[in-house]
Image (spheres, rainbow, N blue to C red):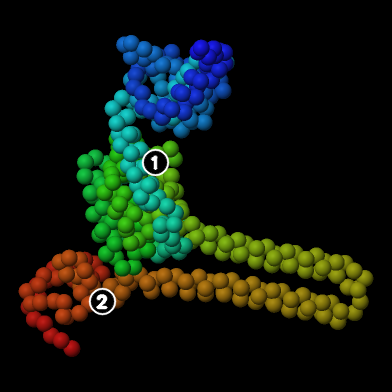
């Protein structure tokens, strides 16, 4: 005899089958009957010409959605089935919403993300350390975009002494990934470069798609210089965010993170200077109070030598305080000037300004020995205000 199930048992059996045996899936349809609940949850149905499906977007998911659901919109949803036992109804719990056409891109994104993650490209153990006090930073972005201006503004404000090497690249549209890869390889040729920032502003999944290309992801992972990604806005995530050595939410945040220790150092110096002057001011105020107490005291009416004695004491004390303050400020100034000289000493532009030059071959590699040059070779000579293209006529060894 077949078993007779109670309603609860039957519903529980259906719930287990739907929720545990059917994996997360993509569903395509047209949104209808949309309702925004006061709690922040969203309820709607999607339909085609034969069926409808009840859908739920929980509050915490709704805050992160890139697409806001609207009645009549054709969408591709990604999520899982759920059964509400008390009413015996099933619904589709939505994780992502994309307008029709975007869903295929998102599927490619998820597939590549899982592939690279399984290969270990996202592992923190494989990420390179970001330098604390970089002096030479490469920036890869559009030369005409707002991202570059945001980055330069932060550098100017918090670390104006650093050397910025800009390599413009195409950051949207076909061959954008190839353009960025080429820029990475160019910057890797600078022997003193310590950090690279790859950046652009926000946009749709189509706008940012070049940052989801596998060849670019592997180029970022395999770069021999640490890379910070600052692509899009807070809610945007691209594949290079996961493979880069550090992910920042915006171009501005990427610039701030790269010079954060320089910023902290400047703040500490300013705080020390402020504390020093506060201590001096409190001491002078105290001595002024003591002096006023003295001139109003009975002792002030005593013989003249008492007045002279305290006047000399106060004068000596004030002089010592002034000398102490000037010594402290002088030491701070000396240390700051020494630091600036050290920074300038490492700046290759200063060497060029002294009359020196740097010689490159046609592959943009620095020529360090006459043995690497032949007659009639084409060379480039970089001086302080430009580059001279030359042909080797004669070679002379020392």
Residue occupying the point 60% across, 61% down: 271
Decide if residue 313 is in sight here. Answer: yes
Q: Residue furthest bottom?
A: 398
Image coords of residue 150 (percent x, y): 39, 48
SS type, badge 2: loop
Decide if residue 228 is in sight here. Answer: no
Residue occupying the point 91% across, 74% down: 299
The residue to which callout 1 is attached is 237
Vertical side of 2 occupied by 397: above or below:
below
Q: Quadrant of the C terminus?
A: bottom left
Image coords of residue 241 (percent x, y): 38, 47
SS type, badge 1: loop
Residue occupying the point 34% across, 64% down: 193
The answer to which of marks 1 and 2 sits earlier in the sequence is 1
Q: Closer to us: mark 1 or mark 2?
A: 1
Q: Which of the 4 quarters of the picture holds residue 155?
A: bottom left
Residue occupying the point 30% across, 37% down: 108
> CA gap, disc 1 to disc 2?
46 Å
Image coords of residue 352 (percent x, y): 28, 73
Q: Which of the 4 quarters of the picture holds residue 304?
A: bottom right
Are circles 1 and 2 on residues that touch, CB within 8 Å? no
Vertical side of 390 occupied by 159: above or below:
above
Vertical side of 165 occupied by 100: above or below:
above
Label ID, residue 205: none
The residue to which callout 2 is attached is 356
Q: Is residue 299 left or right of residue 323?
A: right
Q: What is the crowding at mark 2: few (fewer than 14 residues within 10 Å), some, or many (at least 20)?
A: few
Q: Is residue 313 left or right of residue 141?
A: right
């Amino acid at each position: 005899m077949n078993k007779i199930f109670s309603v609860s048992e039957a519903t529980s059996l259906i719930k287990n089958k739907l929720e545990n045996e059917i994996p997360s899936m993509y569903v395509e349809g047209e949104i209808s009957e949309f309702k925004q609940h006061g709690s922040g949850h969203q309820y709607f149905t999607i339909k085609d010409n034969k069926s409808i499906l009840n859908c739920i977007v929980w509050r915490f998911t709704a805050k992160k959605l890139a697409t806001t659901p609207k009645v009549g919109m054709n969408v591709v949803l990604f999520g899982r089935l759920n059964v509400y036992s008390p009413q015996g109804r099933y619904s589709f719990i939505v994780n992502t919403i994309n307008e029709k056409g975007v869903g295929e891109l998102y599927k490619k994104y998820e597939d590549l993300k899982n592939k690279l993650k399984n290969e270990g490209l996202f592992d923190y153990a494989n990420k390179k350390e970001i330098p604390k006090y970089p002096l030479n930073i490469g920036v890869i972005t559009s030369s005409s975009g707002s991202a570059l201006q945001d980055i330069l503004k932060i550098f100017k404000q918090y670390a104006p002494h650093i050397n910025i090497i800009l390599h413009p690249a195409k950051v949207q549209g076909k061959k954008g990934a190839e353009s960025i890869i080429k820029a990475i390889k160019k910057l890797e040729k600078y022997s003193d470069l310590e950090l690279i920032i790859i950046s652009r502003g926000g946009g749709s999944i189509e706008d940012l798609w070049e940052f989801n290309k596998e060849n670019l992801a592997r180029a970022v992972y395999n770069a021999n210089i640490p890379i910070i990604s600052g692509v899009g806005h807070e809610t945007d995530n691209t594949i290079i965010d996961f493979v880069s050595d550090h992910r920042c939410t915006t171009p501005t945040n990427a610039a701030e993170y790269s010079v954060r220790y320089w910023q902290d150092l400047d703040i500490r110096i300013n705080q020390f200077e402020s504390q020093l002057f506060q201590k001096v001011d409190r001491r002078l105020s105290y001595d002024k109070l003591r002096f006023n107490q003295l001139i109003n005291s009975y002792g002030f009416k005593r013989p003249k030598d008492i007045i002279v004695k305290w006047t000399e004491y106060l004068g000596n004390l004030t002089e010592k305080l002034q000398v102490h303050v000037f010594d402290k400020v002088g030491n701070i100034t000396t240390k700051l000037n020494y630091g600036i000289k050290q920074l300038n000493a490492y700046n290759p532009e200063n060497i060029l300004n002294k009359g020196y030059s740097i010689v490159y071959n046609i592959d943009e590699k620095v020529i360090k020995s006459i043995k690497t040059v032949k007659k009639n070779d084409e060379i480039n000579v970089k001086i302080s205000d430009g580059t001279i293209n030359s042909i080797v006529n004669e070679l002379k060894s020392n």
